[in-house]
Image (cartoon, grey):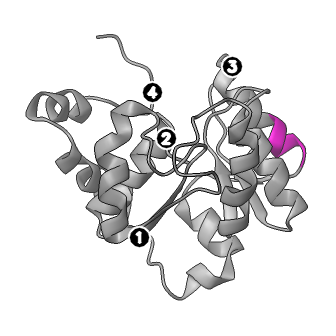
Amino acid sequence: GLARGIDTDAHQVTLHGNGRTIAVLGNGLALHYPPENRKLQDTIPAAGVVVSEFPMTFPPDKSNFPRRNRLIAGLSLGTVVVEADIKSGALITAKLALEQGKEVFAIPGNIFSAYSRGPHLLIKQGAKLVENITDIIEEIGQFRDIIIPPPGLAAVREAELPLLSSEEKDVYQHLTVEPINI
């Protein structure tokens, strides 16, 4: 997708790392949705593709997105659910991925967060629990020969930092996996 949040982050990090990415829209290619991702949508074709099954000027509508999600599942080797409430597009995509015989992965989260309910439900239903990138690489055989996992969290953190402003980098350096007071 090209939604706000994790979709945007995934595309940006992929582009920054000279990777290839695919954005599947829930509207026509001539429109930019969400509007704040206009620059990202215009940048992706240089290192990937933006696709849509809708006519060029077809407007975004909430009924378009479940339909779009079947294409996302179809283009993917697997689906990773990071955050999702029980009724979310991510769970629709996971269901469609399972129906298509694709791998489904889930990252557990805070038990008090509504956005952890979806991944936790998927894990209860048999999705592969993801604690790190190796969990995905081991399940999807095509990745074993082409992806070398980073040496550790520090390498991932350093790779992400260039996307941040100076002020954001300063804050980011103080973050840990455990909650901390400001």
Query: Is residue 20 found left or right of 165 in the rendered image?
Result: right
Of badges 1 and 3, the one in the foreground is 1
Q: Name the residue under label 2.
A: 6
* Residue at x 83% of width, y 36% of height: 121
Q: What stretch is highlighted in magenta?
A: 121-125
Amino acid identity at mark 3: Ala
Decide: few, some or many residues near mark 2? Use Cα within 10 Å; few <14, some 14-19, many ≥20.
some
**Could you tell me which secondary element the residue under label 4 belongs to?**
loop
Give the numbered dot on residue 114. Answer: 3
Query: Is residue 157 found left or right of 148 in the rendered image?
Result: left
Q: How far apart, in angstroms, are the residues tagged by discs 4 and 2? A: 20 Å
Residue 136 in percent (x, y) is at 63, 65
Q: Name the residue under label 4.
A: 178
Assess whether residue 123 is covered by the magenta stretch.
Answer: yes
Amino acid identity at mark 2: Ile
Label whose residue precedes the other's in the sequence (1 or 2): 2
Query: Is residue 36 found left or right of 1 in the rendered image?
Result: left
Give the numbered dot on residue 20. Answer: 1
Assess whether residue 163 is covered by the magenta stretch.
Answer: no
Label whose residue precedes the other's in the sequence (4 or 1): 1
